[in-house]
Amino acid sequence: MLHHDARDEAFDFASHFREDLYACLTARGDTLFELCDAMLCESGPVISPADLTLLAEHRRGHGAMYDALNHGRIDADGLRRALAVLPQRKAADNRLVLAVDVSNWLRPDAPCSPNRLFCHVYGRNGRSSDQFVPGWPYSFVAALETGRTSWCQLLDAIRLGPDDDVAEATARQVRRVVTDLIGGGQWEDGDPDILVVFDAGYDAPRMAYLLTGLPVEVLGRMRSDRVMRRPAPSREEFHWATPCGGRPPKHRKEFRFAKPETWGEPDAETVQVTDRYGTAQAMAWDRIHPRLTTRSAWIDHDGELPVIEGTLIRLQVDHLPGGQDPLPVWLWSSKTGMTREDVDLRWQSFLRRFDLEHTFRFGKQTLGWTRPKLRNPEAADRWTWLVLAAHTQLRLTREAAADLRRPWEKPAEPGRLTPARVRRGFRNLRPHLHCPAQAPKPSGPGPGRPRGSKNHRPATRYDVGKTTRRPESITERDRFRG
């Protein structure tokens, strides 16, 4: 156990969050709250929600549990604000670092479940190839911590629907989270911009454009076959180069990632020695931007296309932890004029993004996020928010948890327990926390369907995939508008 003051502080934060959580459960709140507690007190991985109703922490039956998932209500906006006001650990330069990624709830055998999309997966069922499996994709936003850890604070989760544009929906989600963090006092005037880290599935320059007006800096991974442009010359440079005049260009020569002869000399270059990757060499070029065209994501843009400049970083390491040969990683940041220290901070922050993968694995394999066979996507949203609330309680009580390790496990340092070890002792911590759920009222089981009768109302079957078709050319766009 840690110091008595640290335990009291952990219990205080966790109890206040449990009160806020219960206030956000506006319908069937007692059952949903006890279901979240049972998820934390289960001795092993969560296999199904019905098994949780057999625990002592869940004082109601399995019928009440399914009724709460199908017909309960959760104030998602209030729960987001409750998560935003919690204490957040910041990076080395006192900066908030957010990570955004998508995790899929696969539902291939659920034709009666609406709003399913084709989710991209890799290595499923032992296949070493890409697959597209029907399911519900969820976009998560989490606050990262500094150093090597398996912890992060989940702040928001939304389900991407058939009519959603992924970039626009993610931008709205990040804007809402940043606004809540500012309202919760996590960012004030004079603080460094909040760093938002994206993986290669997002177009970093477009995300920077969609998040204009917020105190954020976008950092994203770029594909290795991209072609970008160098900054346009200034008016003086253009005047001396072309004394006859003319229209100044918006772009200079191409910067091809796959052709080193187009790179030129970097504006900043650093070399760091790491424990996991060996020597890490980073080169940065300032004011690199893509050349946008009125196609694809910019087909609906009115007016002149913007020039979105940033810093391009190329990271090369000696080896990977698994022994594979590493490929160079290309990163793009919306911040210009970086120093050597700024470049090192960016690629180190990007490597911290993979801590979110540990949270996804823990949520799926231990907390049973994708285990329930729920038909309605709204019920899946409620279960997802319960998983977020459960993971948050583990993070808040980790300073007070004891190391209940197995005989073959190594002892962990105080305050360095993994989420699985904290959950192992949560049943001992729960009596010290406030429990606002009311005791159940005795009632008899419902009549149900008469024995031997058939179901004459079969469930509706739904197609999989996008339902909104977007124009692919200017002519097609004008025809849709007309």
Image (spheres, rainbow, N blue to C red):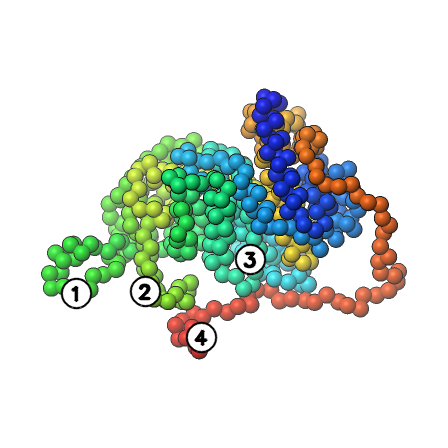
Task: For label 4, count other residues whose C-alpha is less than 10 Å away and answer few (under 14), some (14-19) or many (20+).
Answer: few
Residue 151 found in image quarter: top right
Question: Considering the numbered disc 3 on the image, is that residue within a helix, a strand or a loop?
Answer: loop
In this figure, which residue is indicated by the disc labeled 2? Answer: 304
Q: Disc 1 marks which amino acid?
A: Gly
Q: Residue at x 39, y 41 (%)?
A: 189
Q: How far across and how far down the image is residue 186, in percent?
A: 47, 39
Whether 458 is drawn above or below 272: the answer is below
Taking the image as shown, residue 310 lies to the left or right of residue 176, namely left
Q: Disc 4 marks which amino acid?
A: Arg
* Precedes in sequence: disc 4 or disc 2: 2
In this figure, which residue is indicated by the disc labeled 4? Answer: 481
In this figure, which residue is indicated by the disc labeled 3? Answer: 160
Q: Disc 2 marks which amino acid?
A: Glu
Q: How far across and how far down the image is residue 160, in percent?
A: 55, 57
* Precedes in sequence: disc 4 or disc 1: 1
Question: Considering the numbered disc 2 on the image, is that residue within a helix, a strand or a loop?
Answer: loop
Of labels 4 and 1, the one closer to you: 4
